[in-house]
Image (cartoon, grey):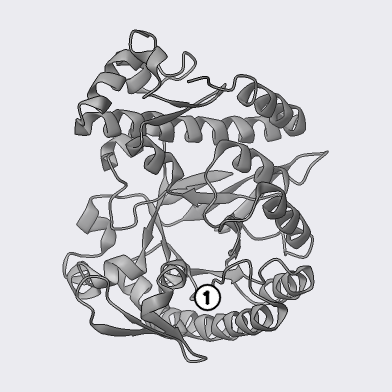
């Protein structure tokens, strides 16, 4: 059984439709993975995620290690049993979380020393133990420990961080192979390309990770504060040097325009907190752009968030009602908006895949961008 199969390549772009197959079932690509950092996707149930159509979600080792702990997850029979999710889970190693907590961590060549955000206790992640812990949790796809850096750092440190990440990648593969030998469990591990915004280092990392025996390849350190033009420039450049026989994963990208552009460059997998985060802030994706439900004009708008959306929120509730419960600080507003925003992203990625299969992805992409930008919301 092949882990990744490319079904169709677009003739005029680098976009492709594929399929990832694990013991828990198949995943059509391109695919967006809702972020369930702490074993829950915020404001939506596992059953609702299945009803939307998701076959894979993301969870985070860093947070689950701190609470409830790897031991408890093993006692529960693994992360899937613990959270009642029988489909695929990709787990992040926590490299980005460590990066974002720079005041309470120290990176060395051996790993990362950090303090708990819960009780201040000291902890140490190594390339090997993060793979071991993800395996103990029962993850279907695991990410290596990497050093994610601010995009503003100089060439010297960017190169040092990239070389450290590559060294950790080799150690991670050694641990993956050990677990495979000793348990017979064919665990899947993805390497991560770093290199900041320095093209020579990105090329070096792309070729180095591609030369390693990873099951998939991810690009990290993008969409971390830079503008969209910079993001896509580095993505497109790096993709030229990536082994495209394996799934290609853009870590941390989830806005509609970014997704259709990244698919253009051949990205197969995405994750991001954006669709659920903006839901809690009163915003919704629509085919004509993002809207803010707090806008005065929605006070007596009894239509759905998006007339083209098939989600239960758009079927059963009006913008006026959602605005009312949002202003009333009712939890239901976040739930309804989350259901809609995740359905919107799921449908966008599914439509992108269909366009690839039909051979007209670039036309689809340009049409989507034009419509999405066609109506800038007025307050």
**Residue 164, horizontal then vertical, whole percent:** 59, 85
Task: Count the labels in the image.
Answer: 1
The residue that disc 1 covers is: 146
**Residue 227, horizontal then vertical, whole percent:** 65, 50
Q: Nearer the viewer, residue 60 or 97?
A: 97
Q: Residues within 10 Å of mark 1 (few under 14, many from 20)?
A: many
Residue 67, quarter of the rendered image? bottom left
In the picture, measured across the screen, residue 257 lies left or right of residue 378, that is: right
Which corner quadrant holds the N terminus? bottom right
Residue 155, quarter of the rendered image? bottom right
Residue in the picture at 59% in, 22% down? 376
Point out the residue furthest to the right here: 12
Query: In this picture, is 309 found above or below 175?
Result: above
Query: In this picture, is 317 found above or below 49?
Result: above
Residue 3, quarter of the rendered image? bottom right
Residue in the picture at 36% in, 37% down? 281
Query: In this picture, is 10 found above or below 317?
Result: below
Query: In this picture, is 17 found above or below 365?
Result: below
Residue in the picture at 70% in, 60% down? 245
Q: Is residue 29 visible?
A: no
Q: Nearer the viewer, residue 107 or 341?
A: 107
């Amino acid at each position: 059984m092949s882990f990744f199969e490319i079904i169709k390549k677009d003739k005029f772009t680098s976009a492709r439709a594929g399929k990832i197959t694990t013991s828990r079932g198949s995943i059509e690509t391109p695919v967006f993975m809702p972020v369930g950092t702490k074993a829950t996707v915020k404001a939506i149930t596992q059953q609702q995620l299945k009803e939307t159509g998701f076959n894979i979600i993301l969870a985070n080792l860093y947070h689950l290690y701190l609470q409830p702990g790897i031991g408890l997850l093993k006692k529960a029979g693994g992360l899937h049993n613990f959270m009642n999710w029988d489909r695929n889970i990709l787990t992040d190693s926590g490299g980005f979380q460590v990066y974002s907590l720079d005041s309470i961590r120290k990176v060395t060549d051996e790993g990362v020393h950090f303090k708990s955000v819960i009780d201040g206790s000291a902890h140490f992640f190594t390339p090997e133990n993060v793979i071991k812990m993800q395996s103990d949790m029962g993850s279907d796809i695991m990410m290596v420990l990497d050093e994610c850096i601010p995009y503003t750092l100089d060439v010297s440190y960017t190169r040092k961080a990239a070389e450290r990440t590559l060294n950790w990648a080799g150690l991670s593969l050694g641990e993956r192979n050990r677990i495979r030998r000793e348990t017979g469990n064919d665990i899947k591990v993805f390497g991560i390309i770093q290199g900041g915004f320095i093209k020579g280092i990105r090329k070096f990392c792309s070729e180095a990770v591609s030369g390693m025996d990873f099951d998939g390849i991810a690009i990290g350190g993008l969409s971390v504060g830079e503008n969209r033009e910079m993001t896509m420039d580095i993505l497109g450049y790096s993709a030229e040097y990536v082994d495209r026989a394996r799934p290609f994963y853009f870590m941390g990208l989830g806005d509609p325009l970014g997704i259709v552009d990244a698919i253009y460059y051949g990205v197969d997998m995405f994750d991001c907190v954006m669709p659920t985060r903006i839901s809690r802030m009163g915003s919704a994706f629509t085919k004509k752009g993002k809207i803010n439900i707090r806008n005065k004009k929605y006070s007596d708008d009894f239509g759905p968030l998006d007339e083209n959306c098939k989600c239960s929120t758009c079927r059963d509730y009006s913008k006026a009602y959602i605005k009312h419960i949002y202003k009333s600080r009712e939890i239901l507003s976040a739930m309804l908006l989350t259901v809609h925003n995740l359905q919107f992203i799921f449908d966008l990625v599914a439509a992108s895949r269909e366009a690839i299969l039909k051979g007209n992805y670039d036309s689809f992409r340009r049409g989507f961008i034009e419509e999405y930008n066609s109506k800038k919301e007025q307050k």
